[in-house]
Amino acid sequence: MNIAVINSGSSSIKFQLFCMEKNEVLAHILVEKIGESISDMILEYEDKKLEIITVIKNHHDGLEEIISLLSKHSLLKDFTSLSAIGHRVVHGGEEFKSATIIDENIIKKIEALIPLAPLHNPANLEGILVAIKKAPNVPQIAVFDTAFHSNMPEEAYIYALPYEMYEKYKIRRYGFHGTSHSYVLKQTAKLLQKNLNELNIITLHLGNGSSACAIENGVSIDTSMGFTPLEGLVMGSRCGDVDPAIIIHMQRELGMSVDEVDKLLNKKSGLIGICKNNDVRTIIEQNDEKSQLAIKVMVRRIKKYIGAYMALLDRVDAVVFTGGIGENSAYIREMVLSSLLYEIELDKSLNAQNSTIISTKKSSVKLMVIKTDEEQEIANECLSLLKNQF
Ligand code: AMP
């Protein structure tokens, strides 16, 4: 049984082809710079890697190119032979609590959620519409980034704003990166040989976008991203938590427009805002005053969230690092974990090796590094939905 996963972004498509029986990735294709004068395509399969420079006008052409590349390398004839196509959809609002087979009604609902995720849902939808055209008889399944957080208690998702803001306009915390937090949770359960629903963990997805999640008995009970993926941790170019009065001040006193403020908070803030760079590797190498400050601000915020989530969970089995920074930077992990609580002890040598378990034997909380795999999680969600449906 082959399942394809499509993660369609505003100017990119990540495509992965899985053979579910063999638990194997048959092909991985990344299309970038869609709509620009030159686009990049990278195909990886077996141990081969092919880079193609071409022109891809839109998502439709992107998927066409993907299909012809797969067929040329005898990896897949066309999409119609697939058992399912899984699509990453960033915002599922309050309605979507799990993976869902896409039909016309579901498309309308994803469309209706565009105002809540104007940067992401239109691109996700584009990928869905093109894939339906290419394979109208194959089940197309939406897997939502918000779904994993959909069982958060009311006190976690209600903002202390007038209640009508929630009732009338659905302004509440939703949380994102759910596919990654969920994948990492399941991997943690396997590695610690525990039942998922008995596990209390804090997951830290630290990448260009970052979020923390408090998981109690296998359920997300709080997470750092909120109404949008802007809230919470300090990210590559996103500010995370700020005093909302700053936004009023920027508009009223500094004369900035709504679009200018939007761009400033999403694209010009976070690490790039403080030290003009969003690549943590480079920032660590640069090591000048602003770079050091950017890292300290980022690390302090992560520590504060860990502390907060420890206070929410009555027991913590593990703190798990994932994402580009979480998986690779022993330096950042050590900064985050230093002087947390004396019962929590990092084994510096295991940490330096990026081992899966990086805590000492006597540490009361397991400290772990787990590589996330959102595409695999989407494929797994598709498979379990198909098994339940048919
Ligand atoms: P992601 O968005 O998950 O791909 O993560 C991207 C971030 O991970 C960037 O800030 C990279 O600089 C960072 N990253 C990747 N590898 C390393 C590394 N070895 N050390 C520090 N940061 C890294």
Image: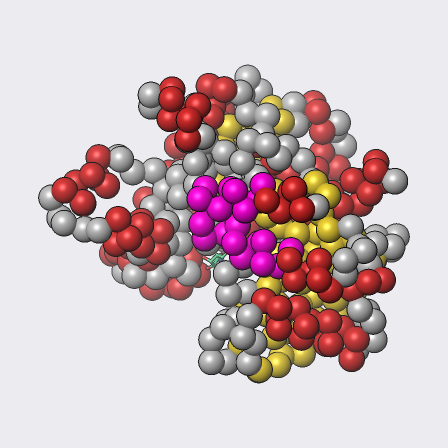
Residue at 78% x, 50% y is 139
Colouring used for the render: secondary structure
Asked whether residue 346 is in view, the answer is no
| Residue furthest out toward the left | 253
Residue 57 occupies quadrant: bottom right
Magenta stretch: includes residue 114: yes
Quadrant location, the C terminus: top right
Q: Is residue 304 visible?
A: yes
Provide the residue span drawn in magenta.
109-128
In magenta segment, residue 327:
no
Q: Quadrant of the N terminus?
A: bottom right
Q: Position of residue 264 (x, y in %)?
A: 28, 53
| In this view, 385 is above or below 166 | below
Question: Who's the residue at 73% across and 64% down the image?
Answer: 134
Left or right of residue 81, residue 361 in this image: left
The image quarter containing residue 162 is top left
- Residue at 49% x, 46% y is 114
User: Magenta region's main secondary structure?
Assistant: helix
**Residue 344 at x, y = what percent?**
52, 30
The image shows residue 251 at horizontal and vertical percentages of 18, 45
Question: Where is residue 160 shown, x and y percent of the image?
Answer: 35, 22
Q: Is residue 281 above or below residue 337?
A: below
Relative to 210, is 109 on the left or the right? right
Residue 14 placement: quadrant: bottom right
Residue at 67% of width from left, 79% of height from top? 50
Compared across the picture, whether 165 is left or right of 105 comes to left
Say which of 113 and 273 sits in front. Answer: 113
Side of 9 where 254 appears, left or right: left
